[in-house]
Image: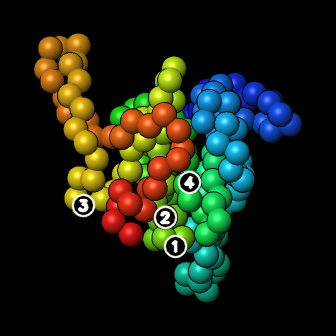
Amino acid sequence: MKHFGQKVELDGITFDSMKEAQFYLQFVKPSGKRFTCHENFEVLGKFEVGGYTQRGMFYRPDFVIYGPEGREHVYDVKTSLSSRGIDKGALLRFKLFARRYGLPVEVVVPTKNIFRMKLFGFTTQLQPAHPRKKRNGKVEIDHYHEFKSIDYDVKGIIGM
C-alpha cells in the first residue's frame, strides 16, 4: 500500500503524518507517560528454506506507551478503521506482534476531541457496535471504542 502522509517534525520527533502528530499532541504528550515513537520490533525471525536464509519480518508501531509494568499500549495511527485504511500486510504484522509480545496493536483514528480504537483479528467481538449510514442508504455496523485519553486498560478489554 502506498502512503501519502507528509512527514511532520514536532518536539524533536519526526512523525509520518499529520494524524500521527495530532494523536501525539492530543493524547500521548498530555498523558505524561513514557513512550517511544517508531520503535522497531522483530515479529518473525529469519529462517532457513532450502539451504538459503529467509529474512525476518519487523513491525514499527507509531507509538508504544510504557507504564510501571512495561508496555501498556501499542498504537498504530490510521486515517480510517476500514479496509481502505489498513492493508492486509499491516493486519498480518499486527497479529504477529500480538503473538510474539502478548499485547494487541490498537489501531486508532484521532478526531477533534476523541480517538476511535479498534482491535483486529479476534474471533469474538470485544468492542461495542456503532451503526453508520453509507452513501447508498444502507446501514453498516462497525465495532470500536471511543476514548478521550490513553488512560484505559486494553488488557481489561481483551480479558487478560
Nearer to us: label 2 or label 3:
2
Element at badge 4?
strand
For residue 54, which numbered disc appears in the image? none
| Cα distance in 3D space between marks 1 and 2 | 8 Å
Front residue of 94/32: it is 32
Point out the residue furthest to the bottom here.
Answer: 51
Q: N-terminal of the two: label 4 or label 1?
A: 4
Give coordinates of residue 21: x percent, y percent. 68, 30
Nearer to us: label 4 or label 1:
4
Name the quarter where the C terminus is drawn: bottom left
Q: Evaluate if marks 4 and 1 touch, with contact meaning CB atoms under 8 Å apart.
A: no
- Residue drawn where x is 57% and y is 34% of the image: 2
The residue carrying mark 2 is: 103
Amino acid type shown at disc 2: Leu
Q: Evaluate if marks 4 and 2 touch, with contact meaning CB atoms under 8 Å apart.
A: yes
Q: Residues within 10 Å of mark 1 (few under 14, many from 20)?
A: few
Count of marks overlaid on the render: 4
- Residue drawn where x is 56% and y is 54% of the image: 74
The residue carrying mark 3 is: 123
| Cα distance in 3D space between marks 3 and 4 | 20 Å
